[in-house]
Every structure is written in structure tokens, then in C-alpha cells.
Image: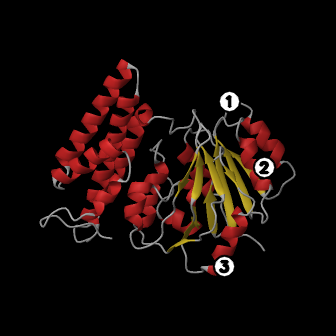
Amino acid sequence: MRSPITIVIPVYNRAHTIGRTLRSIDAQSVKPAHIIIVDNESTDSSLSIINTWASGRPDVTVLSEPRRGASIARNRGLREVTTEWTMFFDSDDEMLPSHIEDYTRAISEHPAADILGRDIILRFINGSTRRLYFHSGRDNMFHHIFRATLSTQRYIARTSLFRSVGGWNESLLGWNDYELGVRLLLTSPVTVNIGGKPSVHTHQLKDSISGLLACDNHPLWERAIDTIRSIIKSLPESCRERDSYLYWLDARAVLLAATYEHEARQSTSPEFKEMAHRLARDLYSRTVDSSPAPHFMLRAIYRHNIIFGRLSWLLARIPVSANYPPPII
């Protein structure tokens, strides 16, 4: 069975994790057609480890990208892809041995598909795990906005689709896969959940861009949301989904504000508490004040999350008023 998949991996200072990722690729029951690794000017031994692993392997290309940024590195790799399908993967995660085989089989079973995906497992630093879901169906955008179902490790897509939307947004340093997912879904792709057991384990790390606390890199997440809002606002007003998408995004923003508030309440540092409280108030107020959605609904979503801490996004399915369009589900 020949795989029509190229894996693109950006790397920056991952000497402590890249070996695990490469070993997981070696263990695949079906090999990818091509592996493109883009070193983003690492200052540790990452490039040496990669070059040693790639030596003598015609299916591996190692590139160097001097401009810093994961999106820049991914776009550099995307330009070199010659296969029909592209899988972006990170240098601190691992794929189980059936991963490429499962996707290769799914490609042949779903010839009309543009995006194929499945659930993954997130492993936290404390050893606990959480299943992160991939959703396919009529309400793809709803689930992506609230659950980031098109996060990097959860799917593969046609190379032509990635290119048609312009690839990765190089100006975003955080939640860039979240923003890319919105642009992909706006093309109305044929999306298929291939099912089966999760075949990717993604690992939480202290030194990752996402960090351990949302407050740590709050400008990154808020800029991604603002960028997505601009994209959705640029849709014609005749687009029946436009207002629902904007409402969902505003609801997602107030949930981020609630996350800041949770972190404030859990912290023992007076300085961090003050900072996190301020971030929560500012983002909540800024979102509600500018949103055309009924404020009572955004407030309900925010307060529900503060009190219960989970499943608050389900409230966004409720029709909000006779004068404001209900969510398109």
C-alpha cells in the first residue's frame, strides 16, 4: 500500500522531544510518501538529531527556515509538497504505529473527501489524559469555534486545499491552527471522521507556545480571535451563516475571559490574581460592548463557565432572541 501523504514537521529547539516523534514515524506500519522537516534556526542540537536520522533516506527532506515562527516553517514545507495529501505534525508529539496506514486506507475509502480526521489523546504534565474530539457534519464550524476540532494533529487535508486558502497565517504566533481551520471550513470542504481509536498522542509541555496558563500568552489568543472575526465580517451580509458565526466567536471570546477568571481564582499570587482579573474584565467588556448579540446571553455563557467550568459552549446552541438569528446547526 503506497501512501499519498507527506508529513510536514516544523522544529525549533526540540532536542528533548524530536527523537520520540521521529521514532514514532519509524514505527509506522505504512510509511508516508515523504517527510519534510523544517528547522527554524534551532540553537540546541535539534538539527544534528534530525540530520543523523535523515541520513541516507531519500524519503526525507530537511530544510532550514531562518525566519522564526511555526507558521512560517510550515508554509516553507508546504511549498515543497508534491503529494495529494498533507499531514502537519509537531515535533513534540507522537503517532501510534497504525496512524499513516489508517489515513491511507481512509483516503481510498472516501475519494470525495477534502479533510479526514479523528480524535486524539492529550497527555498532561501530571500524567492525566483527555480525549480531544474531531467532528464532521453540518455543524463543523460550531464545533471548531468552541472545540478547535481542526487543531493540527486531528486531521489531514488535500494539499490543494491548504494552498487554496493561502496556507498558514504567518502573522499569528498562537492559535494559528484555529484560524486556519476557520478558513478551511469556509470553503465548505467534504469532511470525514475516519473513526477508530485515537492514533496520536500530543504532549503538554511547559515550554510550548500554548504554555500552561491562558493568561501567560493572552495577546496571542485574542489576536487570533480578532483575526477570525475580521475574516467572518468580510463575508457578504447575504451569507446566512455570517451572524451565527460572529455570535459563536463572541461566545468563545467570553469563554476565554472566563478562563482568565478561573486562573485568577486558582492562583495564590496577589500580582497574578490582579493581572488575571483585569484580563478577564477587559476581554469580557470589550467583547460584550462590541457584539450585536443580546448581552444577556453572552453574560449567561460567561457566568455558567465561572460557576460550572465546563460545557458552557452548549448554551450557544440556544436561539438567543426573535430579533437575532439563532445558531445555524
Residue at 38%, 23% in the rendered image: 272
Residue, disc 3: 108
Judged from the image, the secondary structure of the residue bearing numbered disc 1 is loop
Inspect this view and state whether residue 234 appears. Answer: no
What residue type is disc 2 on? Answer: Arg
Residue under the image location 53 percent in, 63 percent down: 162
Residue bearing the label numbered 1: 43
| Residue identifier under label 2 | 23
Is 23 rendered above or below residue 118?
Answer: above
Q: Quick check: 214 above or below 327?
A: above
Mark 2 to mark 3: distance in Å? 26 Å
Q: Quadrant of the C terminus?
A: bottom left
Residues at circles 3 and 1 in contact by the CB criterion of under 8 Å? no
Answer left or right for 293 relative to 72: left
Query: Of the residues tagged 3 and 1, which is closer to the observer?
Result: 3
- The image's colouring method is secondary structure
What amino acid type is highlighted by mark number 3? Ser
Q: Secondary structure at mark 2?
A: helix
Q: Amino acid at mark 1?
A: Thr
Instruction: Measuring from the top left, give residue 219's x and y in whole percent.
Output: 38, 36
Residue closer to the observer: 150 or 273: 273
In this rendering, the label closer to the viewer, 2 or 1: 2
Q: Calculate the distance from the C-alpha at mark 2 to the C-alpha at mark 1.
A: 22 Å
- Residue 138, located in which quarter of the rendered image? bottom left
State which tag comes first along the sequence, 2 or 3: 2
Q: CA distance from mark 3 to mark 1?
A: 41 Å
